[in-house]
Amino acid sequence: MKEYRNFIDGKWVSSRTGKTFENRNPANWEEVVGIFPASDSRDVDDAVSSAKAAFPSWRLVPPPKRADILLKTRDILIRRKEEISQLMTREMGKVLVETRGDTQEGIDTALYSAGEGRRLFGQTTTSELRDKFAMSIRLSVGVCGLITPWNFPMAIPTWKVFPALICGNTVVIKPASDTPLTATLLVEVLSEAGVPEGVVNIVHGGGGSVGTAIVEHKDVSLISFTGSSDVGRDIGGRCGRSLKKVSLELGGKNGQIVMDDADLYSAVEGALWGAFGTTGQRCTATSRLIVHEKVLKEFTAMFIERTRKLKVGDGLLPDVQVGPLVNKGQRDTVDKYVKIGISEGAKLLTGGKVCEEGDLKKGFFYEPTVFGDVHRKMRIAQEEIFGPVIGIIPAKDFDDAVSILNDSDYGLSSSIYTNDITRAQRAIRDLEAGITYINGPTIGAEVHLPFGGVKATGNGHREASVTVLDIFSEWKSVYIDFSGKLQRAQIDT
Ligand code: UN1
């Protein structure tokens, strides 16, 4: 069994604890994918010192040269795409077409971030005084602590690592303990691409031991976290107390509206992909279907029929469409919410059970589940489940649908199926979410557009696109006076 290590100061090293944990395949729990170090705060100290020592010279490497390393990283990711994607399916379960997409998202992010090496634009502007020049530039922040989730084990680490590097920061990565392997492969690739020693470090282990130590470390200047809103609140509070820069990408309870004028076939296709892609384990997953009452019956019948046909199984098998939940705890949560839905009076239309036939009992599979007669205030319509469960909520008209969709603590992604341009435009304006899709499901964000949400989904930052640079760089305003005398802003006219 292969034993993997932390990567600190350009070397693969065991944890100071001497302890390890197993990474297992959720489609077949008997299969151990790898052994990883169960680190603690001493390993974090080592990693942060190495990142701190590497920072002064890395911040002075010209950004186009940093970009060359990212372009090389991209080439290696392309070369290893299939191998990485297969291993990713083995460690977290989602089907191979999706893990290939996840790796591709990392490849896209490498190209996009590398492009920033020759941009990183600031502004040149005017001065209110004569013979004075003004501009703003981006500077590096320092050591960044990057805490990443298991549902996009390649894409999300790259969303953070690549922009952090192009901006001249050094990083300590703490990947989710359900998916340590994909992040390790990413670090391997970066090292092969020529990232200098100490610039990229990875420390494996639990949130309580490793994550908290990174967040609390005095030499870490910035935390970027993707995960649950509960953990995000804790991290945000800690960073608030120490005045660390922090970007939080948290939960969602995304809704898809289906209007009476929609193309129902396409709305069903979208809902299936949005609800059951990645087994519902995306922060952008569709978990509420808000359907105009005029098409409710027809849409529901079509959707149920298609849901029942979905093939659940090991994501490495070619015809499988829905893989397992990532671990037993996640499947128990799904089952708990199904019971809550039933007790709240929602109607279980299909699914609702753990899959136990044949090989499926070796892993953590759950039937794709649809509830009807869901009310907007039910817990299954309000709380993030993170699994293959969706509730259908009837809406009287467009305004009612928008009000239901907005009746959520979260605001990440949203969608409306309609052929009415007025409704589409109003939805773009009125849906309270960081992302709105017209005639598309709630999933499928591309790397060159801002990613993030409003309300409890985060703390106002946007990853991906150019907006991510505002997370990983500090603005400096520069004033250059060539008048040869003292000139006072707001006073000398
Ligand atoms: C997430 O849901 O955690 O838009 C990230 C999407 C993907 C990224 C999702 N490109 O669904």
Image (cartoon, rainbow, N blue to C red):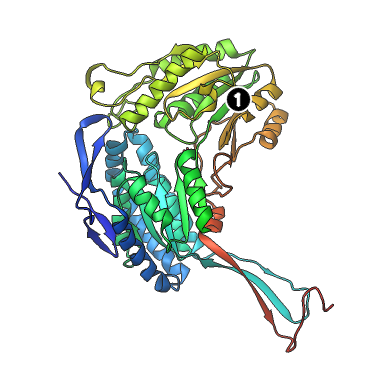
The image shows residue 355 at horizontal and vertical percentages of 31, 18
Residue 361 found in image quarter: top left
The image shows residue 134 at horizontal and vertical percentages of 68, 74
Q: Please, is residue 172 above or below residue 252 in the view?
A: below
Q: Which of 466 and 412 is in front in this view?
A: 412
The image shows residue 251 at horizontal and vertical percentages of 50, 37
Element assignment for label 1: strand
Residue that protrudes farthest toward the right in the picture: 493
Q: Is residue 266 visible?
A: no
Q: Is residue 357 visible?
A: yes
Residue that protrudes farthest toward the bottom in the picture: 484
Residue that protrudes farthest toward the left in the picture: 1
User: Residue sitting at 46 percent across and 54 percent down?
Assistant: 223
The image shows residue 6 at horizontal and vertical percentages of 26, 55
Residue under label 1, please give it.
257
Instruction: Using residue 181 as the reference point, say whether residue 343 is left or right of it.
Output: right
Q: Exactly how many numbered labels are in the figure?
A: 1
User: Residue sitting at 34 percent across and 30 percent down?
Assistant: 329
User: Residue sitting at 48 percent across and 55 percent down?
Assistant: 112
The amino acid on which the numbered mark 1 sits, given as a three-letter code, is Ile
Q: Please, is residue 454 above or below residue 344 in the view?
A: below
Q: Please, is residue 107 above or below residue 50 in the view?
A: above
Residue that protrudes farthest toward the front in the picture: 241
Instruction: Using residue 249 as the reference point, say whether residue 72 is left or right of it.
Output: left
Q: Nearer the viewer, residue 224 or 194?
A: 224
Residue 484 found in image quarter: bottom right
> From the image, which quarter does the N terminus lie in?
top left
Q: Dot 1: few (<14), some (14–19), or many (≥20) neighbours within 10 Å?
A: many
User: Residue sitting at 74 percent across and 71 percent down?
Assistant: 126
Q: Please, is residue 147 above or below residue 24 in the view?
A: below
Instruction: Using residue 104 as the reference point, say whether residue 197 is left or right of it.
Output: left
